[in-house]
């Protein structure tokens, strides 16, 4: 028995022995509209531009936060290496000075009340972290 081959314009599935043109995800009729791929380059470029701006903004935020944290670390390191003979109270403001020999010390005396070489005034917060005023 010889099978009759269908013409190319007829969509016939030889495995299922059925006409399945309606089930195909593409056009099977000569009169069907042309399938064209959409140009996604513009969308990709806009998306790349948006993500680049988002990443750059996040990077700048993290960089600023890191610089702030490092400055806070330096201030705390400077104060904890200085000399003081009292226990600082949370919520109070203290003043850091530098002696002529290079040593630093912490005091409760404000810079306008003395003639020491002032390095800055600091506030001790509830987390025991010194904040520069």
Image (cartoon, rainbow, N blue to C red):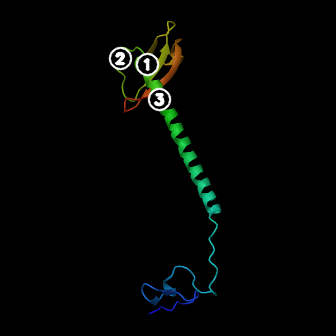
- Circles 2 and 1, Cβ within 8 Å, touching? The answer is yes
| Left or right: 106 in relation to 112 | left
Please say if 70 is above or below 34. Answer: above
Alpha-carbon span between mark 2 and mark 1: 10 Å
Image coords of residue 31 (percent x, y): 64, 87
Alpha-carbon span between mark 3 and mark 2: 22 Å
Q: Which of marks 3 and 1 is nearer the N terminus?
A: 3
Taking the spot 58% from the left edge, 88% from the top edge, the residue there is: 9
Please say if 37 is above or below 88. Answer: below
Taking the spot 51% from the left edge, 13% from the top edge, the residue there is: 114
Q: What label does residue 126 carry, if any?
A: none
**Residue under numbered circle 2:** 86
User: In the structure shown, which secondary structural element does the residue marked by tag 3 occupy?
Assistant: helix
Please say if 73 is above or below 108. Answer: below
Alpha-carbon span between mark 3 and mark 1: 20 Å
User: In the structure shown, which secondary structural element does the residue marked by tag 2 occupy?
Assistant: loop
**Residue under numbered circle 1:** 108
Taking the spot 49% from the left edge, 15% from the top edge, the residue there is: 97
Which quadrant holds residue 106? Answer: top left
- Circles 3 and 1, Cβ within 8 Å, touching? The answer is no
Q: Which residue lies furthest to the left in this view?
A: 87
Q: Earlier in the sequence, mark 3 or mark 2?
A: 3
Image coords of residue 27 (percent x, y): 57, 82
In the image shown, does 48 or 29 lie closer to the viewer? Answer: 29
In the image shown, does 7 or 130 lie closer to the viewer? Answer: 7
| Left or right: 23 in relation to 47 | left
Badge 2: few (under 14), some or many (20 or more) residues near its Cα, within 10 Å? few
In the image shown, does 79 or 12 lie closer to the viewer? Answer: 12
Q: What label does residue 72 carry, if any?
A: 3
Q: Earlier in the sequence, mark 2 or mark 1?
A: 2
Which quadrant holds residue 88? Answer: top left
């Amino acid at each position: 028995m010889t099978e009759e081959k269908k013409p190319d314009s007829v969509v016939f599935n030889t495995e299922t022995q059925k006409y399945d043109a309606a089930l195909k995800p593409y056009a099977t009729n000569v009169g069907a509209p042309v399938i064209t791929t959409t140009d996604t380059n513009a969308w990709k470029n806009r998306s790349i531009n948006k993500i680049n701006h988002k990443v750059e903004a996040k990077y700048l935020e993290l960089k600023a936060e890191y610089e702030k944290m490092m400055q806070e670390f330096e201030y705390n390191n400077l104060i904890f290496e200085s000399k003081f003979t009292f226990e600082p109270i949370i919520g109070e403001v203290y003043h850091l000075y530098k002696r002529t020999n290079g040593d630093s010390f912490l005091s409760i005396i404000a810079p306008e009340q003395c003639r020491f070489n002032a390095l800055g005034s600091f506030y001790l917060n509830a987390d025991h972290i010194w904040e520069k005023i």
